[in-house]
Image: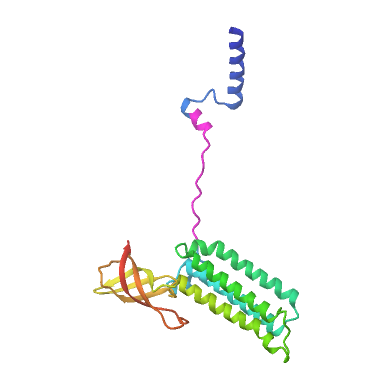
């Protein structure tokens, strides 16, 4: 037994010498064996410096910058599709990769930046991007790659694909409005004076409200920094954006 104990002590001493644990105090032994997990601080998203003053003048922040990039990409997708269909229909090997690239970029924006910028209403923004991409491709397929060739003899058949594309776009946007549309939005109180308040509102695709400062009436008592719910008056077609109404309730501070 003494011999076995001596062999055990020998290997223990060798192990302590290799790993350097035997000479450490007890509290440092436990610390050496425990693997610490470093918590990476969340990266703060910022607008590029060249555009900061542009967005600050419009009381807009990083979410509005992300939506601006999405709108530019959507515009580029539509312009590319129109140029391909109308002016250069033979340049398939140039425009199809361009359309695929712009569609992939929009999918990337929807999966990453839009998710971080509009967490509360992210499904609505994701659906909007999907509808825009689908609209461009539906028209490209219907007008450029339709299996029915246009001629005076089969004009009725030739009109089916473009009419189907128009109906598709109308139905999808109508469905989007019914599913995600709402008659209220949220904002932060910047100033108060009696029953009047100035509210800072961010871009809201669900209520079709643009970012900015809005002077409104308040039927409840609010103060600077309060987050409030606001009524929204929508025009018939909503092309020029909705109008912010009155403060309905205070959400939090």
Q: Is residue 144 left or right of residue 115?
A: right
Residue 132 is situated, as x and y percent measured from the top left of the image, at 57, 74
Q: Residue at x 53, y 66 (%)?
A: 126
* Magenta-colored stretch includes residue 44: yes
Q: Residue at x 71, y 75 (%)?
A: 95
Span of residues in magenta: 28-45
Closer-to-camera residue (214/48): 214
Q: Is residue 20 left or right of residue 201?
A: right
Q: Residue at x 59, y 19 (%)?
A: 12
Res 18 → quadrant: top right
Residue 152 is situated, as x and y percent measured from the top left of the image, at 72, 92
What count of labels does the image hold? Answer: 0
Outermost residue to the bottom: 152
Please say which color scheme the image uses: rainbow
Residue 48 appears anywhere in the view: no
- Chief SS of the magenta region: loop
Residue 45 is situated, as x and y percent measured from the top left of the image, at 50, 61
Res 3 → quadrant: top right
């Amino acid at each position: 037994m003494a011999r076995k104990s001596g062999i055990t002590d020998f290997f223990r001493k060798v192990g302590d010498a290799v790993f350097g644990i035997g000479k450490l105090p007890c509290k440092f032994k436990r610390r050496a064996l425990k693997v610490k997990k470093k918590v990476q601080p969340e990266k703060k998203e910022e607008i590029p410096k060249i555009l900061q003053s542009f967005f600050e003048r419009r009381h807009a922040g990083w979410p509005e910058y992300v939506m601006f990039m999405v709108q530019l990409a959507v515009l580029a997708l539509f312009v590319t599709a129109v140029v391909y269909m109308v002016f250069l229909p033979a340049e398939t090997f140039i425009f199809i990769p361009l359309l695929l690239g712009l569609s992939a970029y929009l999918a990337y924006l929807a999966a990453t930046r839009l998710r971080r910028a509009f967490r509360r209403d992210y499904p609505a923004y994701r659906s909007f991007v999907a509808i825009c991409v689908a609209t461009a491709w539906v028209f490209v397929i219907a007008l450029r790659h339709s299996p029915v060739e246009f001629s005076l003899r089969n004009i009725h058949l030739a009109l089916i694909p473009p009419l189907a594309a128009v109906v598709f776009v109308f139905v999808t946007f109508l469905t989007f409005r019914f599913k995600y549309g709402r008659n209220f939005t949220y904002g932060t109180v910047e100033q108060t004076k009696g029953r009047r308040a100035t509210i800072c509102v961010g871009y809201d695709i669900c209520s079709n409200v643009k970012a900015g400062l809005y002077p409104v009436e308040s039927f409840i008592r609010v103060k600077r920094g309060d987050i409030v719910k606001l009524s929204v008056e929508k025009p018939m077609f909503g092309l020029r954006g909705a109008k912010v109404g009155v403060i309905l309730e205070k959400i939090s501070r």
